[in-house]
Amino acid sequence: MKHYDVIVLGSGGGTKLVRPCADLGLKVAIIEKGPLGGTCLNRGCIPSKMLIHTADVATIIQECSRFNLHVDGKLSVDFKALVERVDKTIDADSNSIAPAYDKHPNIDLYPGEGKFISDHTVQIGDVQISGDKVFVAIGTRPSIPKIEGLEGTPYMTSEEALRETKQPKKLLVIGAGYIATELGYFYGALGTDVHFVVRSELIRKEDKDVRKAFSKSFKKRFSLHEGLVPVKVEYTEGEFALTCEDKQKARTVLKGDSLLVVTGVTPWTDHVGIENTSIELDDKGFIKVDEHLQTTAKNVYALGDCIGRYLFRHSVNFEGEYLFRTLFQEKKPEPITYPPMPHAIFSHPQVAGVGLTEDECIEQGIDYFVGLNKYADSAMGMALRSEEGFAKLIFEKRSEKLIGAHIIGEEASNMIHMLIGPMTMNATLSDLLKMIYIHPALPEVVRNAARKANQPKA
């Protein structure tokens, strides 16, 4: 049995430990059953944003009459060529990782599914390896709801939706979170008739004002069937029939040639032999870790989606860098302290946020005040002819510290960085008002929101 200083299960966020540890002279084993690079590179954020950018361009063209521009003829898309171009780019990036590992004398790549034999022993096929420290970064997979008739039909999850080369004519979407709204927007902007089945409301974890504005805008572009629960799926001769019920049990049948199921994720912890270790899971199957990201097994650590804290690539990057720094580089066992964790939804309109929502402030009994400014109430906002965009800032009342920021509209995923930095540095309203903002750049929306928050409060 070959022994290593470090074993890493998963080549997504786990890569933050592979090469850095190997460069220190440590012997590292990396185990991956799928394409190298993990979910983000192969079946998540990167391919989806490459596709969504095309949708953004199409949306601009389709709505260009707002700017007194007119395009003759109908916009068309070479859907197959688009998806194949993105796939080729992603696959080339993923395939470039193994040769780089092969050239490193301290890295051994084990293709295949790793299963624990004990806390520090992992089997890959017929090979067993052991390690002093083991890092579990196995991620998650789409969670499939139990709906009568769904199993066995050619429905898509997010993974298939990113690789589908045939454009659906009519797409039914079960789900209302950020992945559902991103992928539904991609297909819809390029000409597919998209229908969303929404149990409660769209992007329900966002701030209430953002949810309201997003839903209002989204309904102008796509068909939303709200308050419905899918109960049955039938597939006959290339057509899906989706039966749904409302609260009164009244039934509605929706039909389409494609069905996309995007209802959350579940960790891969049921596939890696956790039962053979002393690693404990929570009631949803996520790995329990302490303030040092150590599991209940000594010198076995977990990071990323499989611990269920934050389901972002930027969060697992932070966790991986923390583990490398505290365990190998500086060797200082300080607990992990997360700075404000931002997020974004790359749909249309874009949404981004960091910190507390107004609902969370109320739930936690925090005294707060708000500054909100519409995009339209700024010079660049007027140029963009924005109808739904705004920036909303939330401040703790006594200290006037910025504790939440939420943006909907053009470039929201970039605009939010105007507030991630200040929030990380515990900035106050006064700090935001001291800044000079370029005129007439879009961040003046943030300045104006801060100015409105500075108005006398009852």
Image (cartoon, rainbow, N blue to C red):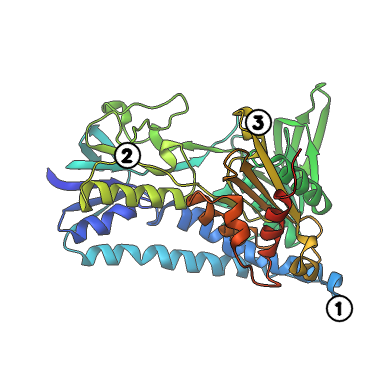
Identity of the residue drawn at 26% across and 35% down? 116
Q: Position of residue 246 (x, y in %)?
A: 80, 27
Q: Position of residue 375 (x, y in %)?
A: 75, 60
Location of residue 55 (image quadrant): bottom right
Callout 3 environment at 10 Å: few (<14), some (14 to 19), or many (20+)? few
Sequence-wise, the earlier of marks 2 and 3 is: 2
Of 1 and 58, nearer the camera is: 58
| Residue 416 at least partly seen | no
Residue hosting label 2: 335
Sequence-wise, the earlier of marks 1 and 3 is: 1
Q: Is residue 14 left or right of residue 382?
A: left
Which numbered circle lies on residue 362?
Answer: 3
Residue hosting label 1: 72
Q: Is residue 287 left or right of residue 148?
A: left
Identity of the residue drawn at 37% across and 35% down? 271
Of 364 and 191, nearer the camera is: 364
- Identified by mark 2, the residue type is Pro
Q: Is residue 358 left or right of residue 113?
A: right
Quick check: marks 1 and 3 in contact, CB under 8 Å? no
Q: Secondary structure at mark 2?
A: loop
- Identified by mark 1, the residue type is Asp
Mark 1 and mark 3: Cα distance apart in space = 51 Å
- Identified by mark 3, the residue type is Ile
